[in-house]
Image: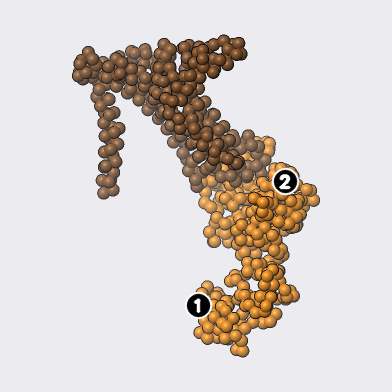
Amino acid sequence: MISLLLIPASLLIFLVFGMPLIRYVWLSFHASSVITGLIPIPNNGGNWIRLINDLRFWQDTIQTIRFSFVSVTIEIVLALFIALILDQSCKGRGVVRSLTLLPWALPTTIMALGWRWIFNTPYGPIDQLLNHLNIGSLNILSSPNLTWIATVIADVWKTTPFVALILLAGLQTIPEDLYEAFRLEGGTPIQALTKITIPLLKPYIFLGILFRMAQAFGVFDLIQVMTGGGPASSTESIAMYAYINAMRFLDFGYSATVMLGGFILLIISSFTCFILVYHSTNVQEKITS
Amino acid sequence: MSLILKNLGRKVNHSWIIHKLNLKVDKGECLALLGPSGCGKSSTLRLIAGLDKPDEGSILIGGEDVTNISPVKRKVGMVFQSYALFPHLSVAANLSLGLKVRGVSEVEQKKRVFAILELMKLEKFAIRLPAQLSGGQRQRVALARALLRDPLIYLLDEPMSNLDAQLREDLRPEIRTLILGGNKPVIYVTHDQHEAMAMANKIAILNEGVLEQVGTPKELYENPSSLFVAKFIGRPQINIIEERKEELKCIRPEDIKFKSNGLRAKLEYKEWLGSEQLILFKTSKGSIKMLCKGSDEIPEDAYIGWAQDKEHYFNKKTGYRVNKLLKY
């Protein structure tokens, strides 16, 4: 009987999540563009064959993975340091904690505009500084080898607080007397970090990776505002490519295929993370017991 | 090897949580720090371990002043109330971690861990995680870790408060032989007077950070130096029979007897506890508790009294003992 009560919620999830997904899958097997007069015509998986042979899609995939992997790695390391600092008890800790969260609370478009200005050539502060140091302008936002680094920096700046918050929550589940017992046994603070904190924080680190990977894989707004995918598509993400196909080329069938391709890649990477999380959840149970 | 606390004091938020504490624990002696929660007994233990710094006074272990020495060098074996076992490490790894960080060779580590596991009958659980152990087993691992430290003094912070009554009784002899037999000073923090009396040679009663009395369990029971100690030691609690202007007259429930020419008492209620029963009488001097044999017949109306040499007198204002020491 209880399962009957689940029907409204399941229905809602199906309508807002399942239906669009099914529609996407259906659309990815149809040609639906200006050429067909936006009428979906079955094309026997032609979209998928095109996707597999689409070099721009694979380039975007590599760029998306590069962006996600580099920024998430940096975020986790930085967030661990920040969380360790925020976990210390001192005066005004609440204020510092709130301030640390500020970048995360800022709308992405606004902070992306700010970072675009910071990296602006020749008026942005970074260029000004480089000129002062007689290094000369790096043309950060117009050199294909550097621009993606700028987007990573902006992403790290924005989302590190989020990861730090997750890790801070994890740190607070570790009882203080474990550290005290370790201290009495002769452990140094560094050993406490490597032998107690990090092993016990593992589930939270994986949780942070999982959340951030899912977000970074679908990155759109930050890159759209900061670089528009350029220069020379060097920062374009899968989500952006899907958007361009739908909104610029009005090829909805192929756009759906690109989005699904990205979705499958995301599932694979998330699943990998999930297995890692699963293997460390037993550690979490031990903390709570 | 003895432990001496001299004038020890610690302030938190400008108020003393431990003040002018003087104690001496000799080797092979077990001192129980007893008191209600918040009396400073755990804080005292933390000061001795070196986890907190005193604001006043000094700590001497084996004649050496260790007040400003790091916790490791004090070589204390501490059992935490929560056991503080590392949840991500197996029992064997929990035990060897300390040896590892102190730079003991791997062969030696294995040898010593195995020996202690055998001693504590924990061999079967060597590869289990703390979460897979029962409360009593966890407690034994915590004890094993303290033993393995080969400390100069043992500090036990309510080591049995997380166990059920039966297990506590079972573990008492084990702890006594393992730790008290080690010929080292032992400090045992507890809020349970029965446990303190069973485990310790000496009991120190703390009240709001101040030492009320220190002595053998017998001394504390027979001649409490203050009303606080009298109320804390002995169950059921001592009767206060207010009489004189400045003094309180107190008699223990077990010293109250039926007496034909005594005080007229009306039975209010009784608790039958098996070997004994607790009776509450209503008298002209207020409610009086009495402890008598479980087999005794209790009349509705009775006359009760007590021997004069069982009377304890305490100052009404200060709570200190007024009359001479009693001889039981």
Q: Residue at x 57, y 57 (%)?
A: B161
Q: Amino acid at mark 2?
A: Arg
Query: Against A119, is B163 above or below?
Result: below
Amino acid type, label 1: Tyr
**What is the quadrant of the C terminus of chain B in the image?**
bottom right
Which mark, residue B74?
2
Q: Which chain hosts label 1?
A: B
Residue B268 visible, this angle = yes
User: Which badge, 1 or 2, comes first in the chain's sequence?
Assistant: 2
Specify the farthest residue to the bottom: B261
Where does label 1 land, which residue? B269
The residue that appears at 54% across and 40% down in the rendered structure is A94
The picture places residue B163, in percent across and down from the top left corner, at: 54, 56
Please name the residue shown 26% across and 49% down the image: A1
Q: Is residue B203 visible?
A: no
Give the foreground label among 1 and 2: 1
